[in-house]
Amino acid sequence: MMFNELMEAVRRELPVKRWEHTLGVMQSAKELAHKYGADPDKAELAGLLHDFCKYWPTERQRLVILESELPNELLNYDKPLWHAPVGAYVVSQEFGIKDEDVLNAIRYHTSGRVGMTLLEKVVCLADYIEPGRVYPEVETIRLLAETSLEKPLIAGFDSTIHYLLTKGEKIYPLTLLSRNALIDEIRDRRMNR
């Protein structure tokens, strides 16, 4: 499928505001990729596809989780988390996207994971800082993104965790593990200088 056809397929799945967000993530991911040395084309593609299933009905996402190899434990956590792994699975099946780097960037853009790749960091961070985002910590995270990928991602995960705590929601363990792994990465880098 050509990139323009993919764009149209994604646009049809999203309300206008989320489509604008997607365009912002694509652009931010491409800029971050150029800045930090990731593949800009893969970053743009993952940015385009990252929210493909975001507005699917909960039941439809639940069925994908149950009928695929996705971990059923996802069903025990906040529903907005589901669209990332569901999206990676669906775009692989529907569009034939087989690039594991791109699929993992989609799969982990909400939770992160231990040992995030450069592309995964770029797409996850782009989702936090794209120009249309408005939330209390976004300007701080954007400033941190000027000199690091890890520091703004930690701040982003902190923001997500804080939000879930204030709502009394469960926190997906992978998000905590991702945050801690990024802190370890920064410490290890300092110690090896």
Image (spheres, rainbow, N blue to C red):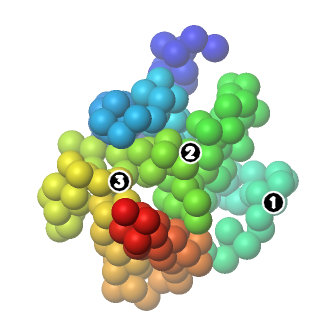
Give the residue at mark 1: 66
Q: Is tag 3's residue or tag 2's residue first in the polypeptide sequence?
A: 2
Give the residue at mark 3: 149
Front label number (3 vs 1): 3
Give the residue drawn at x 20%, y 66%: 137
Give the residue drawn at x 36%, y 68%: 190
Q: Give the CA separation, mark 3 to mark 2.
A: 17 Å
Residue at the farthest front position: 193
The amino acid at mark 2 is Ile
* Element type at mark 1: helix
Q: Is residue 7 above or below residue 17?
A: above
Q: Give the quadrant of the C terminus.
A: bottom left
Please tell me how crowded label 3 is: few (under 14), some (14-19), or many (20+) other residues with Cα within 10 Å: some
Q: Give the quadrant of the N terminus.
A: top right
* Element type at mark 2: helix
Q: Is tag 1's residue or tag 2's residue first in the polypeptide sequence?
A: 1
